[in-house]
Amino acid sequence: PFIDYCGGLKANAARVVAGGPMMGFALGDLNSPVTKGTSGVTVLTDDDVRCPVETNCVRCGRCVDVCPLRLVPTRIALACRHRDWDQAKRYYVDACMECGCCGYVCPAGIPLVQLIRMGKAQMPRSQATGN
């Protein structure tokens, strides 16, 4: 595996991610190929991957403040969670570039990007294209 060429994994390695910690995705297999489209490989420790317990949104607005597109990630994520595709479209779910800034700053530990990504994948094609 490519990790061997980098000196191998340390004892406290918990997860290997293709890309960075905010936009990357976990590799299930260390034999996964590294291609020219792979921007990097990040090895995370147990402390890095410890997920906060999700609580209710406290309406702090941090996610909106850091969104480069000035979207309202909590509204989009909630609509996606409830499979309310019309509401998700009203809040411009398709405009979200899934940068991960909103989830990174969320004090409630809401997996905003994951919910939005899941919603985009599950949204019926007719809804996604506006037909």
Image: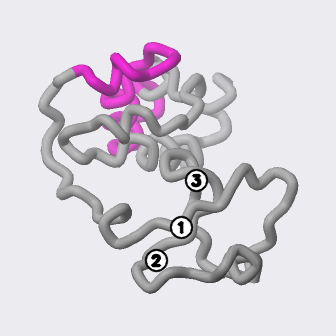
Residue 54: x and y in percent read 20, 52
Left or right, residue 127 beside residue 37: left
Q: Looking at the picture, which amino acid does disc 1 mark?
A: Val
> What colour scheme does the image use?
one colour
Q: Looking at the picture, which amino acid does disc 3 mark?
A: Gly
Name the residue located 43 percent from the left edge and 76 percent from the top edge: 14
Question: CA separation, marks 1 and 2?
Answer: 6 Å
Residue 81: x and y in percent read 35, 45
Residue 86: x and y in percent read 46, 26
Name the residue located 63 percent from the left edge and 53 percent from the top edge: 19
**Residue closer to the observer: 102 or 43:** 43
Range covered by the magenta-colored residues: 61-87
Left or right, residue 50 beside residue 99: left
When asked about the image quadrant of residue 90, the answer is top left
Q: Is the magenta stretch mostly helix, strand or loop?
A: helix
- Mark 1 burial class by Cα count in 10 Å: few <14, some 14-19, many 20+: some
Residue beneath disc 1: 43
Q: Tell us which disc is closer to us: 3 or 2.
A: 2
